[in-house]
């Protein structure tokens, strides 16, 4: 009992410093933001192009993520196969890999001379680097773990008894998924989709490495922020950063309960 | 085993961090420049300054030079934001002038010049011989972004040659341009002659005739940072780069004399 008070004080001090490290950069952006010129900074042609492109790329990235991540999560949750733990670990790789390294990997896999990309190029004349599709793919690569983690937890938490009952009553696996699993898990799935979309929206390293920087095609908001900083246009950079910040905060505030519940 | 896994991983992370951050510099003999300095330099100086750093440290035992290489504009921003550095070398006078106006560097001296080069894959499979060949719709061209010196010079060279093209990408720094060509993702790029030489056998340069134009030369100023922690060693470094030995090394790596 006697030792508890100092220990909790230590914990409080650590927590305060940790909280400050997390919150102060956000406060810094708000403090230095050009509030008066925000509207004009966000409506320059370059900013509008970047905003529109970011919506397009992150939208497609989310489509790719859902189309591949939900089945992947379902397989990891429901199908016992050798090496499942290895696959589950591999899914997490983009979370800890530097995005730039992910971008190099994407080039070596899907680039014009890449493992798979050479066939895309030779057979279909499809070239992903320097294209909007490439930017969407890079964003999907980093966003996928967010959806798979959340969706797998949702599928594991779902009531297997109900699914088995539906199966015994003659429902096909797809019908069971659609009418039993999905209605029971969709709030958590939606949380995963929203998180993946927010991550895709903020993606920088893999995008600039794999898709390059081409205004109107691959220059999304994060790339535009970086270029504005390079040319010394701090105010415009902060204005665009605030857009990303507002989206992140909105997504997290909306999903607080789901995210905590899912993990 | 699985219980020990997390502990082992944590231990490994701490060990790696400890080794990486352990460095530190001992004091050198009295009177000689000693200690360590951090030099922020344009990406195109990577090979040259790394080699000059070895020469310098061999001459001055007890002195150590650390480098940060990136696009000149990025480095200028870092200096303005208070990044600890002793020396700044940019690939154009414009960026240096901006840093000087912000009060983060002292008086600059020109230390070298560099020429543009058209970089293509080894063997030049697309048969690119002139800047006009870049306008072929099948050619994937990458340039530096207009925010960095090589982007401004490259755009000027194309404008002067009357070539209007849509580059596939405007890369963050000159090394990224060469890397995209070396990886085969781009057919051609505009970089500096020294970068083509430093990139190895995957790429080669094409003489496109703009290289003799003095207006299209990159100029490299170098200056002591106002917030230098070790100004004596910073001055010694700049003196060394401008010395006969330093200039000879720069010429050897393809730079033009200041």
Image (cartoon, rainbow, N blue to C red):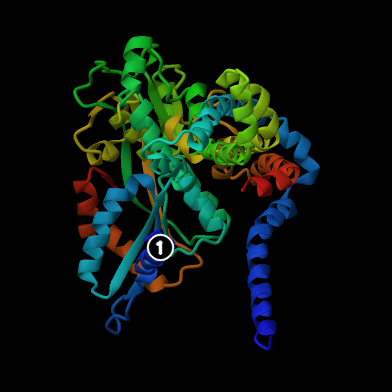
- Place of residue B83 in the rendered image (x, y in percent of width and height, measured from the top left): 51, 61
**Quarter occupied by the N terminus of chain A:** bottom right
Residue A22, image quadrant: bottom right
What is the crowding at mark 1: few (fewer than 14 residues within 10 Å), some, or many (at least 20)? few
Chain bearing tag 1 is: B
Residue A1 drawn above or below residue B187? below
Q: Residue at x 20, y 53 (%)?
A: B248
Q: Is residue B210 above or below residue B76?
A: above
Q: Position of residue B207 (x, y in %)?
A: 25, 26
B9 or A143, which lies in front?
Answer: B9
Q: Would you say B229 lies left or right of A155 here? A: left
Determine whether B8 is above or below B44 in the image. Answer: below
The location of residue A86, given as percent across then percent down, is 39, 43
Give the SS element for disc 1: helix
Residue sitting farthest toward the front: A168
Q: Residue beneath label 1, please? A: B13
Q: Of A35 and A143, which appears nearest the observer? A: A143
| Vertical relation: B72 (above or below) B104 | above
Instruction: Report the side of B135 relative to B106 (left or right).
Output: left
Outermost residue to the right: A36
Res A153 → quadrant: top right
Residue at screen point 34% across, 75% down: B25
| Number of numbered discs overlaid on the protein picture | 1
Specify whether A223 is left or right of B239. right
Residue A46 visible in this rendered orientation of the protein: no
The outermost residue toward the bottom is A2
Can the viewer see residue B199?
yes
What residue is rendered at 46% in x and 29% in y? A211
**Nearest the camera: A152 or B236?**
A152
Tell me where residue A7 appears, x and y as whole percent.
64, 80
């Amino acid at each position: 009992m006697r030792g508890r008070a100092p220990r909790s004080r230590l914990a409080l001090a650590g927590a305060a410093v940790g909280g400050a490290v997390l919150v102060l950069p956000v406060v810094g952006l708000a403090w230095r933001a050009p509030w008066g010129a925000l509207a004009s900074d966000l409506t320059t042609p370059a900013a509008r192009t970047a905003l529109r492109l970011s919506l397009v790329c992150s939208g497609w990235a989310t489509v790719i993520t859902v189309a591949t991540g939900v089945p992947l999560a379902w397989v990891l949750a429901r199908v016992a196969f050798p090496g499942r733990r290895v696959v589950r670990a591999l899914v997490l790789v983009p979370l800890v890999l530097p995005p730039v390294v992910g971008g190099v990997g994407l080039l070596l896999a899907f680039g014009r001379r890449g493992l798979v990309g050479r066939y895309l190029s030779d057979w279909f004349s499809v070239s992903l680097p320097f294209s909007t599709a490439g930017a969407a793919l890079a964003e999907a690569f980093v966003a996928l773990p967010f959806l798979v983690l959340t969706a797998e937890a949702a599928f594991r938490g779902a009531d297997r008894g109900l699914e088995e009952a539906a199966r015994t009553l003659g429902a096909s696996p797809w019908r069971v998924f659609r009418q039993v699993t999905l209605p029971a898990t969709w709030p958590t799935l939606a949380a995963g989709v929203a998180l993946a979309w927010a991550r895709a929206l903020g993606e920088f390293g893999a995008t600039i490495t794999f898709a390059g920087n081409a205004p109107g095609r691959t220059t999304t908001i994060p790339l535009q922020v970086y270029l504005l900083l390079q040319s010394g246009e701090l105010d415009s950079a902060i204005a665009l950063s605030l857009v990303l910040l507002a989206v992140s905060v909105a997504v997290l505030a909306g999903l607080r309960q789901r995210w905590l519940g899912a993990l | 085993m699985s219980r020990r896994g997390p502990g082992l991983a944590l231990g490994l992370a701490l060990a790696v961090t400890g080794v990486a951050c352990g460095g530190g510099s001992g004091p050198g003999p009295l009177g000689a420049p000693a200690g360590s300095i951090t030099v922020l330099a344009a990406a195109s100086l990577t090979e040259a300054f790394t080699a000059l750093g070895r020469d310098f440290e061999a001459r001055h035992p007890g002195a150590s030079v650390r480098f940060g290489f990136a696009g000149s504009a990025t480095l200028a921003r870092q200096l303005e934001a208070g990044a600890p550095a002793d020396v700044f070398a940019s690939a154009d006078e414009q960026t240096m002038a901006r840093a000087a106006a912000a009060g983060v560097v002292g008086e600059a001296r020109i230390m070298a010049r560099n020429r543009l080069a058209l970089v293509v894959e080894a063997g030049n499979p697309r048969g690119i011989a002139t800047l006009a060949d870049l306008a072929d719709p099948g050619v994937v061209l990458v340039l530096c972004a207009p925010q960095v010196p090589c982007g401004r010079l490259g755009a000027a060279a194309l404008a002067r040659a009357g070539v209007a093209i849509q580059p596939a990408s405007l890369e963050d720094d000159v090394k990224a341009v060469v890397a995209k060509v070396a990886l085969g993702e781009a057919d051609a790029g505009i970089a500096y002659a020294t970068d083509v030489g430093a990139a190895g056998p995957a790429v080669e340069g094409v003489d496109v005739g703009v290289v003799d134009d003095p207006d299209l030369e990159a100029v490299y100023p170098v200056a002591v940072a106002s917030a230098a922690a070790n100004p004596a060693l910073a001055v010694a470094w700049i003196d060394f780069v401008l010395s006969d030995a330093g200039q000879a090394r720069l010429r050897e790596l393809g730079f033009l004399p200041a």
